[in-house]
Amino acid sequence: MGLDGRKNTRYLLLFLFTVALSSLTPAAGAAPAPDYDNIVYTSPNGVDITLDIYLPPATLGDGPFPGLVVVHGGAFRQGSKENWAVDADRASASGFATYAIDYRLTCDPANPPTGVDPSLCGYGATAPVSDVQAAIQWVRANASTYRTDGANVGVLGGSAGGNIAGMAGMSGNVGEEKADVVASWSGEVKLPLRPLAPEIRYVGCKLSSCPSKWDLASPHFFVDPSDAPIYLANSTDEIIPLQEATDFRDLCAAAGIPVELRILEGTRHERAYKNDVWAETMSFLHRHLDS
């Protein structure tokens, strides 16, 4: 096996490990309860998709608070809003009206992953992006009910959720379904660089047979000066190549988009390093969302 083959195998093993880690739900009784749960925010083709809401504590006042949509990871095929309950609650304590969402996935409806509603399985690119954009629109439309500033709504996501969050900040209409700021931890921004099984399943075809579809699922190809400010984090030797993040940072900077990239040493992927980037992620989001 050549060097590239060994590297791809290593990335695949790291990927499988981190996907398993990201799909773990908190221990029973450990997850904080949302202020509102299982609210339907969109129903594409009759499929109800829900979100949970975590509001800032009374000690922070009555608001309105900037909105933050939280997007879980899981290789586009698994995970749920409950996986990010602790993070959503923590973000609300930082002064965000936080919305943890479910979205459509690539899993097999006949054999869904643990904790996944089978009605959310069987989809591909770019259904999750449409769902996140629908969530942003729902938050804006219902902002006054949940003490939210509907004119300032950001998105935070990790891994696959980071890709989807990036797409929500790089596509759509400003002030409507497009995010006002994005934070992406280990999010893929250029899918053609990693034509592996999860990406093939998500796009729906191999890179060699439909390259344009891979581009349409990649934030890298949507960059223009109207795009949302974006915070990026990536480890030096994790499953998402660092070069992907640095190239994207440079592309955004050249377009005049406010962008920051935090580089962490080692192999940690998305929430494995969250405590190291939490404060600066919250600071970046507040800087671009606070009225």
Image (spheres, rainbow, N blue to C red):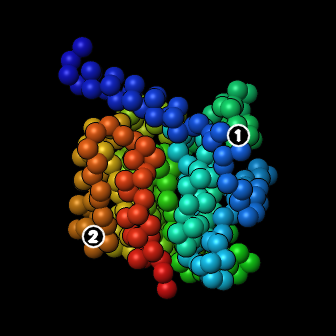
Tell me which residue sits at (38%, 57%) in the image: 277
Image: 30 above or below 256 = above
Q: Quadrant of the N terminus?
A: top left
Q: For mark 1, does the 10 Å Cα neighbourhood hold few (<14), some (14 to 19), or many (20 or more) residues?
A: few
> Which is closer to the viewer, label 1 or label 2?
1
Check disc 2 and give the amino acid type: Ala
Q: Position of residue 19 (x, y in %)?
A: 50, 34
- Classify residue 40 by image quadrant: bottom right
Tell me the element at label 2.
loop
Residue 41 in sight in this render: no
Check disc 1 and give the amino acid type: Ala
Q: Position of residue 51 (x, y in %)?
A: 70, 58
Tag on residue 197? none
Whole-number angstrom distance, CA of label 1 to CA of label 2: 46 Å
Q: For mark 2, does the 10 Å Cα neighbourhood hold few (<14), some (14 to 19), or many (20 or more) residues?
A: some
- Residue picked out by circle 1: 28
Tell me which residue sits at (34%, 22%) in the image: 9
Residue 14 in sight in this render: yes
In depth, the one of 284 and 89 nearer the eye is: 89
- The residue lying furthest to the top in this view is 1
Dot 1 or dot 2: first in sequence order is: 1
Q: Position of residue 155 (x, y in %)?
A: 51, 63
Image: 14 above or below 222 = above
> Are dots 1 and 2 in contact, CB under 8 Å?
no
- The residue lying furthest to the right in this view is 46
Tell me the element at label 1.
loop
Tell me which residue sits at (37%, 64%) in the image: 280
* Image-based side of 34 in relation to 233, left or right: right
* Image-based side of 38 in relation to 181, left or right: right
- Residue picked out by circle 2: 255
In depth, the one of 232 and 172 nearer the eye is: 232
Q: Position of residue 75 (x, y in %)?
A: 51, 38
